[in-house]
Amino acid sequence: MLVGVPTETFPGETRVALTPAALPPFEKAGIDVIVQSGAGDAAGFPDEAFTEKNGRVGSRQDVFGADVVVQVRTLGANLERGRDDLDLLREGQVLIGFSDPLAHPEAAKDIAGRGVMSFSIELMPRITRAQSMDGLSSQATVGGYRAVLMAADALPKMFPMMTTAAGTIAPARVLVIGAGVAGLQAIATARRLGAVVEGYDVRPAVKEQVESLGAKFVELDLDTGDTETAGGYAKEMGEEQLRRQREGMARVVGASDAVVTTAQVQGKRAPMIVTADMVRGMSPGSVIVDMAAGQGGNCELSRPDEEVVEGGVRIFGPTNLPALAPFHASQMYSKNLQNFLLHLVKEGEVVIDPEDEIADGTLVTRGGEVVCPRVLEALGQGKAVAAS
Ligand code: NAD
């Protein structure tokens, strides 16, 4: 079996889907790898690093000739440039990567039209067995880290407390909204830099995790009895709950030097938590980094990949933070793909066991059709399916 690794074409994407470390375990399993020349350059993995591990290097055409093509961003997550590759895909081929299938189900239809069997990494089930294949989590870890660095860099204050001959410097106050994978990493990073950190999440179950990182958990008086799906994702909140959340949040936001927002509800627009009024209640020079800017934003004023300044508050909406640490982001994603592919391949073939939650849960297209019920629902072609 041959696995192809094309260069990523999404603007600003620096990651590569496989790193050389994946090649020896693949070789053992009878899987060869061909990498497009230069695919790993931006992440710090030159062609020679792949050839040293018995990888081949070739053109984009060569790479798309492989049995399995692995990408960071397949068409659904690379809507413009991804189209150029559609003609290179062929029947019976396997395609694996991020594809944002619930937000862009029409792209899944185009992939299906090429007769390709495709898997979406976003749909990885949240079960213990799949943790090592969970690309959303690995990349969210990198994103949470980079978001705090962005805030620290933009803030005119230092993060740690310092007692110096020139006086005592008070530590910066950082608020992290949404304490999932990215949020917890943001909290940990801000703590390492010495800030006083508060964390908030609508799922009360995370209070302990926030506190174990040395941050204070913000308690708002909301009815949080039914805020989590069986799969560990947050449920969408009602308008009344969101309104009460905003009221309580205004006080905490106003007292913060830096706010990092990471709140997401899978397959839905991100909840708007930090209003324009709350921003106006912050001191000039304060910073907001909205990690959900690409999904509609947790802050009313953030714009994807732009800096907005309101009353002296700088608001950033980075949409591809993992690409700012591409070496480690690629290393982690590659490990996710390695584990996933080794899980799927039996005797040189990708085998789908309908009883296997991992293969079945991530499969989006097969035999010329979109087969994932949640993607079909997003296309308006299926019955309502509960988020898992
Ligand atoms: P996510 O990216 O979907 O959301 C980020 C956070 O935003 C979540 O914690 C969510 O509760 C929070 N949120 C949503 N709406 C909010 C609102 N209105 N106000 C405040 N916060 C809000 O989630 P994620 O980071 O991918 O993970 C969520 C949970 O799933 C975590 O507890 C994580 O540990 C768990 N998880 C488990 C596995 C596994 O077992 N394999 C894998 C990944 C994640």
Image: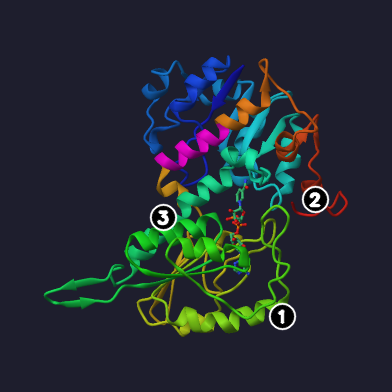
Which region shows up in magenta? 327-337
User: Residue flagged by tag 3: what amino acid is it?
Assistant: Arg
Q: Position of residue 302 (x, y in %)?
A: 51, 69
Question: Does label 1 or label 3 sit earlier along the sequence?
Answer: 3
Residue 169: which quarter of the image?
bottom left
- 159 sits left or right of 375 in the view: left
- 48 sits left or right of 170 in the view: right
Q: Is residue 328 magenta?
A: yes
Q: Position of residue 340 (x, y in %)?
A: 61, 32
Q: Position of residue 176 (x, y in %)?
A: 48, 67
Residue appearing at x 57%, y 17% in the figure: 31
Question: Does label 1 or label 2 sit earlier along the sequence?
Answer: 1
The residue wearing badge 3 is: 146
Residue 379 is marked as: 2
3D distance between C-alphas at marks 2 and 3: 34 Å
3D distance between C-alphas at marks 1 and 2: 29 Å
Mark 2 within 8 Å of ligand 1, using the beta carbon: no
Q: How many labels does the image show?
A: 3
Residue appearing at x 52%, y 44% in the figure: 10
Considering the whole magenta stretch, tell me its main secondary structure. helix
Residue 240 is marked as: 1
Q: Residue extending furthest left?
A: 165
